[in-house]
Amino acid sequence: MNLHVDNSHELSRDAMLEKIILLTVSYFCVGTELRFLNNNASAEEPVKAKDKHTDVEKEKKKKKELSEMWHAQALEASARFLPSECPLVAHVITNYQKHHSPALTIIPEDDELTEDLRVVRPLNEVKNDNINYY
């Protein structure tokens, strides 16, 4: 029985675009569900100031990072392979900017640094130019 199956239609432009769209939507859905789960956990369980660094907070941070990673994967796949005028690309970009923008990160200005900070000054030989290093 010589049964020859021709799968060349799977490599056509439309079939590849469909696969990329399905991949993008899958990544986007996983990221959105993780974000929803994280938001629901935050709403159900208010965190006290003392318990800031507990396992619950670490788990929430991990879910937030995973959500951002999945959204970034969706953004990468859609922006790289789909046309820029595609509504899916615009939606993924807008959603990523809304929920994971670097401008949304909180800068802990009043918290103490846990890392050792060492300031390195240039050697005297390097001070030949007119810049004041003091």
Image (spheres, helix red, strand yellow):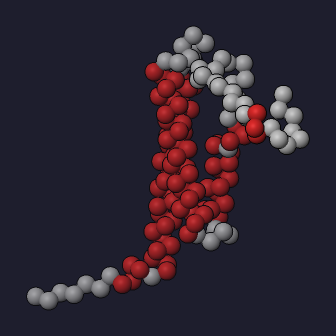
Choose between 104 and 98: the one closer to the eye. 104
- Residue at x 63%, y 43% (from the top left corner): 100
**Left or right: 121 in relation to 62:** right
| Residue 22 image position (x, y, % from top left) | 47, 63
- Residue at x 68%, y 69% (from the top left corner): 85
**Left or right: 49 in relation to 122:** left
Can residue 36 be seen here?
no
- In the rendered image of this protein, does residue 23 appear above or below residue 43? below
Residue most extreme to the top: 50
| Residue 30 image position (x, y, % from top left) | 47, 48
Q: In which quarter of the image is the N terminus?
A: bottom left
| Residue 122 image position (x, y, % from top left) | 73, 34
Q: Quadrant of the C terminus?
A: top right
Choose between 104 and 31: the one closer to the eye. 104
Residue most extreme to the front: 125
Can residue 34 be seen here?
yes
- In the rendered image of this protein, does residue 49 appear above or below residue 129? above
Quarter of the figure with residue 107 = top right
